[in-house]
């Protein structure tokens, strides 16, 4: 298995991060693989999952989703098997077996199986009409349901839950959002900006209930109601569960790879087997797992270099990834710390007429966090200050007014 002709790279999964790896691989100066074979669990080639919310809302069509056209794969000698996921890894023989029975040898294997929506463990989750919002098939089903029904409950006030809720609202459904925490987007926003978001979405027609947890989904065959922890019942035709993700580790675990919450990898994305790598939402670096696409892209960039140059010293460095979102047309930005503690000061600026809000957190004359709502043009500049941990004493008084005021100071 030492000649180039026998070097075969197999990739399990074909999401956005796997596609990024492919594009980086074909751009490397040396090409060690005679063949690249991709096994995709979905029937559709890699597509832009970020655009699914626009598709649900009616602002995009499916033709805009694919990341590459079929000719691109043929041009680069990449074979993609759609709808045929890997079912088993044989590490001794260095082969993978797929659901359809296909057996494929590999010299290098990449696991990019992503994640799935987390289960809440509620009675009634298996009822018809209980859905998730994660992939293209989910989105198609939600669009179809919205044409036939009028009421929906979304469980989860994070980004995906709010995107699902707003898309269904724009499809004409009456939507209630249930969120266990005290405010929406509690991982990205502070209490004040979360309240501003709740007010804005309520004005658009969503019903928001925070500090609320469902205890059961009710119905005989079809879901008919959601029972809350205060015994309240909410009648509904559809329930969308959007309350976190679970890394898909089963394939790696059954192959005997080292797994914790996700598949353990080093900073060159190598698993406990030197011939197998993992990246994206299914992997874990030290104690950190990843739910955003940006760190997955960074991992793909590193892995492409490692696969094409075994002597490469490049490593993945976990960085503070800023969150840039747009919920129902409202821009939101956050980076670093979002709530004050005993060692931080808060600098707050708010324009009540335009519903804009800025909160900056400072410790020892260094910016440690930024939350922006309604106006986010200075967000990346703030994130650079946070990551560089530079002394802001010279422009501390102007900090809330953004880049241009601080640079002038």
Image: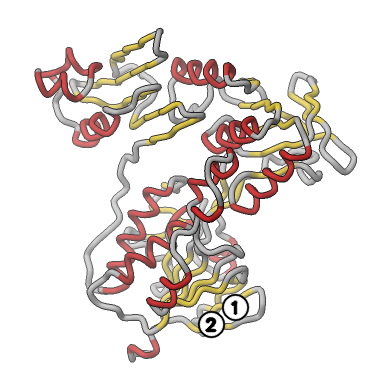
Q: How many labels were placed on the picture?
A: 2
Mark 1 to mark 2 CA distance (whole Å): 6 Å
Circle 2 — which element?
strand
Q: Which of marks 1 and 2 is nearer the N terminus?
A: 1
Q: What residue is shown with label 1?
A: 97
Which mark identifies residue 104? 2
Residue at the image position 49 percent from the left and 53 percent from the top: 64
Q: Which residue appears at 41% of the width and 79% of the height?
A: 77
- x and y percentages locating residue 58 in the rendered image: 58, 40
Q: For the residue carrying disc 1, how many other residues have a C-alpha within 10 Å: few (<14), some (14-19), or many (20+)?
A: some
The residue carrying pointer 2 sits among few (fewer than 14), some (14 to 19) or many (20 or more) residues within 10 Å by Cα, namely some
Task: Name the residue rendered at 44%, 53% in the picture.
Answer: 284
Q: Where is residue 388 in the image (x, y as percent from the top left)?
A: 19, 36
Q: In which quarter of the image is the C terminus?
A: top left
Residue 103, image x, y percentages: 58, 83
Q: Indicate left or right for 298 with 150 as reference.
A: left
State whether residue 71 is above or below residue 382: below
Where 241 sits versus 337, above or below? below
Query: How is the model colour-coded?
Result: secondary structure
């Amino acid at each position: 298995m030492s000649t180039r002709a026998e070097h075969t790279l197999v990739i399990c999964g074909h999401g956005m991060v796997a596609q990024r790896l492919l594009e980086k691989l074909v751009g490397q100066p040396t090409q060690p693989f005679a063949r690249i074979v991709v096994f995709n669990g979905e029937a559709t080639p890699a597509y832009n999952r970020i655009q699914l919310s626009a598709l649900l809302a009616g602002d995009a069509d499916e033709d805009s989703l694919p990341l590459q056209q079929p000719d691109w794969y043929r041009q680069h000698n990449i074979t993609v098997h759609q709808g045929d996921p890997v079912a088993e890894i044989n590490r001794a023989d260095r082969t993978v077996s797929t659901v359809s029975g296909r057996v494929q040898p590999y010299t290098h294997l990449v696991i990019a199986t992503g994640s799935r929506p987390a289960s809440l463990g509620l009675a009634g989750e298996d009822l018809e009409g209980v859905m998730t919002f994660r992939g293209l098939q989910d989105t198609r089903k939600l669009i179809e349901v919205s044409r036939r029904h009028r009421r929906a409950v979304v469980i989860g006030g994070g980004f995906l839950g709010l995107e699902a809720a707003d898309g269904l609202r724009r499809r004409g459904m009456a939507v209630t959002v249930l969120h266990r925490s005290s405010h929406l987007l509690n991982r990205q926003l502070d209490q004040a900006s979360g309240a501003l978001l709740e007010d804005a979405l309520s004005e658009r027609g969503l019903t928001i209930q925070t500090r609320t947890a469902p205890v059961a989904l009710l119905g005989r065959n079809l879901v008919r109601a959601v029972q809350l922890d205060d015994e309240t019942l909410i009648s509904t035709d559809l329930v969308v569960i959007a309350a976190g993700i679970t890394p898909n580790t089963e394939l790696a675990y059954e192959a005997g790879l080292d797994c914790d919450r996700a598949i353990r990898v080093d900073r060159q994305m190598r698993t406990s087997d030197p011939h197998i790598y993992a990246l994206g939402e299914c992997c874990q670096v030290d104690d950190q797992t990843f739910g955003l696409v940006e760190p997955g892209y960074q991992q793909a960039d590193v892995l492409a270099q490692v696969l094409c140059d075994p002597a490469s010293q490049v490593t993945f460095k976990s960085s503070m990834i800023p969150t840039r979102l747009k919920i129902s047309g409202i821009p939101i930005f956050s980076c670093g710390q979002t709530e004050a503690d005993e060692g931080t000061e808060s600098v707050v600026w708010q324009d009540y007429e335009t519903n804009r809000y800025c909160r900056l957190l400072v410790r020892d004359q260094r910016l440690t966090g930024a939350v922006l709502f309604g106006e986010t043009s200075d967000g990346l500049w703030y994130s650079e200050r946070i990551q560089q941990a530079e002394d802001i004493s010279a422009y501390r008084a102007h900090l809330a007014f953004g880049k241009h005021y601080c640079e002038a100071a």
